[in-house]
Amino acid sequence: MGAWWQLEAGSRLTPLTGKNTVPDELMLLFTDADHFVDEAQVEALSELEDAPEEFDSDEEPWPRRMVGYSATAGTLRARLELQGFGTLRVHALCAALFDDDLEPDPEFPSLDMRERWPEGRSTYSDGSAVVDALATRRGQDLISRYRQYRPRSSEQKFLEHMWELMQESFDDPRFELALILSRTNPSTRVTLDLTDVVVGGYVSLEEQLHLSARTRMATAVAASGPIIVITEGSSDARWLRHALRLAAPDTEHLFEFLDFDQTRAPGGVDRVESLTKGMAAAGVMNRIIAVFDNDTAGREGARRLSSLDLPTGVRVVCLPDVPYAQNYPTLGPTGPAPADINGRASSIEFMFGEDVLLSRNNELYPVQWNSLLTASGAYQGSLSAEHKRAVNARLDDIFATSGTQIVPSSVLEGCRRLAETLHAAAAPSPYVPGSEYSELSAQWRAQESAEP
């Protein structure tokens, strides 16, 4: 037979109810502070069930409001507004839907249910009149599940039809709730009573459904939503996009890059750190990849960011090592000398092979050692501004081509290396794809966070 949860506004039952499982969309409206458990009722019920004599649920008083969620109508309306279910919008959409349904059909005039009683057409002349009726306590009492077994008038059957049409057309329960609460006093206490589904064993007493709903939404967004990539600058973002386009076109659309050119956001190591920490603090559910250059400053920034307690969906990486950077020409206080610049001076310009780094004299543009970073005790190096512009222009010209057949093989190799780095960082955390309707127990679903 199952068990029912129900929503109450003050002391009255509303038409919003359901069997066995509570939709996640509805639970997204509630918080820790809204959750309640009446321990006295829990203890009393436990004593009755453990009594030596057989427990007869038909004779014993059934518990009510033993466990559930409660908030004022004003609080819930404010949350609904921010989630896209404001009163004015819901009323307007409902009225338009009902107007379509009430449009007369010349071939079948008898299908108009308003013809069944004398005041039908005058009482409900258009969709707005129907919405106004359904938003009242009287209208909601007429269509309540608990009234359907009593003799029903023609008006009641009409309103039930319109309510069911609304439910089928706008199948998010928050839409229904917004209409129910649209004329409720803001101070009225609204209660989602889960007692029946808890006693019936469909939900455990310890389970907090609002947290389960957020977890499922977070894993769904993380697994299926865009992967946000944060880089040190516009050229990094631009060339990583090209790398995916050339080396991994089938998955390119899954990655979204911060658009420095459009937002005019400043770049650099500090910016990657601040943006990543800000998104993590804001609870952004998408997977986030913070990409630092493979130089001294980038390695230090990655170390600082990785030391924080970041969500599992936030990954921190540096650009990969490249073999030709192991013995690369550099300029320092003691003159020119080859050195391994991986982790010390290897920025995005070094990711696409040696050919793009060659001068007109067929010599590699040298790295210049700039300053000592005291935190890591190592020097930071980079190309000169002139050489950097030359490499940037060369890469932009190469990526302006449309196909892989005319892109140098060394550049394609670099694209594959970068695509592999992004793919590895984007690997989702394993999770059990079970919704609120799943037959899996809450304890079983919780194993997803413990999987290796």
Image (cartoon, rainbow, N blue to C red):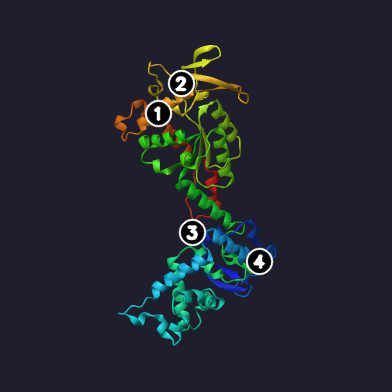
Identify the residue at image location x=58%, y=43%.
278
> Which badge, 2 or 4, comes first in the chain's sequence?
4
Closer to the eye: label 1 or 4: 1
Give the number of the mark in front: 1 or 3.
Answer: 1
The kind of residue on which mark 2 rests is Ala
Question: Residue at coordinates 35% horizontally, 30% vertically from top-left?
Answer: 398
Give the structural element (helix, strand or loop) at label 2: helix
Q: Label 1, on which residue?
A: 393
Residue position for label 4: 45
Q: Is residue 220 left or right of residue 399?
A: right
Task: Of the two numbered discs 1 and 2 on the same chain, state the one appearing first in sequence.
Answer: 2
Q: Residues within 10 Å of mark 4 (few under 14, many from 20)?
A: some
> Given this view, does label 2 or label 4 mark the residue nearer the observer?
2
Residue 325, which numbered label?
A: 2
Whether label 2 touches label 3, CB < 8 Å: no
Q: Nearer the viewer, residue 83 or 330?
A: 330
Query: In 3D space, how far apart are the residues under numbered discs 2 and 4 (Cα atoms)?
Result: 72 Å
Q: Amino acid at mark 1?
A: Ala
Q: Position of residue 361 (x, y in %)?
A: 38, 15
Which quadrant of the structure image shows residue 10?
Answer: bottom right
Rounded to the nearest angstrom, the CA distance separating label 4 from label 3 is 27 Å
Q: Which amino acid, mark 4?
A: Leu
Where disc 4 sits, the SS reads helix
Q: Residue furthest top?
A: 334
Residue indicated by mark 3: 437
Q: Which residue is at the front of the view, 450 or 85?
A: 85
**For residue 104, which quarter of the picture?**
bottom left
x then y, percent, for residue 98: 43, 73
